[in-house]
Image: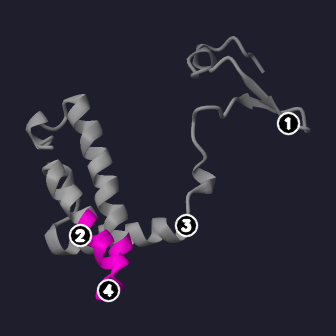
Amino acid sequence: MDTTNEKVNELPDSGERTEFETGSVRDSMKGKGFPNQLPIAALKAASKRFEDGAYKYGSRNWEKGQFYSRYIDAIYRHLWAYMEGFEDEDHLSAVIWNAMCLYQTDEWVKEGKLPDKLRDI
């Protein structure tokens, strides 16, 4: 195998390596997160919330941009409903959904993909 290929040289490289017992080597995982530790039940619940929202408002509607305050208010309302024992809907998945969308919206605002005026807090 020719390792001087230009494509190999284009791979991102942290400079650190993990060597397996088999002798195989990969770039370090440091700083890349641990997706294998994400809680599957919470991810499934959030995914279902995205599905329900897509049916109600249209697929990917939230990506058009919403004010931060709307996400924050909903997070608190659903968290309080959960804390008070309401079971009329899955309030925890609503907390997760709103937090995820707020986080992504903030990233897109920072990147200039959505307007800064959405940051109304």
Compute the Cα span from label 4 to label 2: 11 Å
Which portion, as a residue range, is magenta? 76-92
Q: As shown in the figure, which amino acid type bears the numbered disc 4?
A: Phe
Q: Which residue is mark 4?
A: 86
**Residue located beneath label 1 in the image:** 20
Spatial distance from mark 3 to mark 2, Cα to Cα? 24 Å
- Sort mark 3 into few (<14), some (14-19) or many (20+) by Cα contacts within 10 Å: few
Left or right: residue 7 compared with residue 100:
right
Mark positioned earlier in the residue sequence (1 or 2): 1
Q: Is residue 5 magenta?
A: no
Mark 1 or 2: in front is 2
Residue 114, image x, y percentages:
16, 38
Disc marking residue 77: 2
Say which quadrant the C terminus sits in: top left
Q: Name the side, left or right, on which 45 lies relative to 59.
A: right
Q: Secondary structure at mark 4?
A: loop
Q: Give the image quarter of residue 8.
A: top right
Mark 3 lies on residue: 40
Numbered disc 2: secondary structure: helix
Q: Marks 1 and 2, how far apart in space?
A: 48 Å
Callout 2 crowding tier (Cα within 10 Å): few <14, some 14–19, many ≥20: some
Sequence-earlier tag: 3 or 4 = 3
Q: Position of residue 107 (x, y in %)?
A: 29, 37
Picture layout, residue 52 above or below residue 108:
below
The three-letter amino acid code for the residue at tag 2 is: Arg
Total numbered labels: 4
Q: Residue at x 25, y 30 (%)?
A: 111
Q: Sequence-wise, which precedes: disc 1 or disc 4?
A: 1
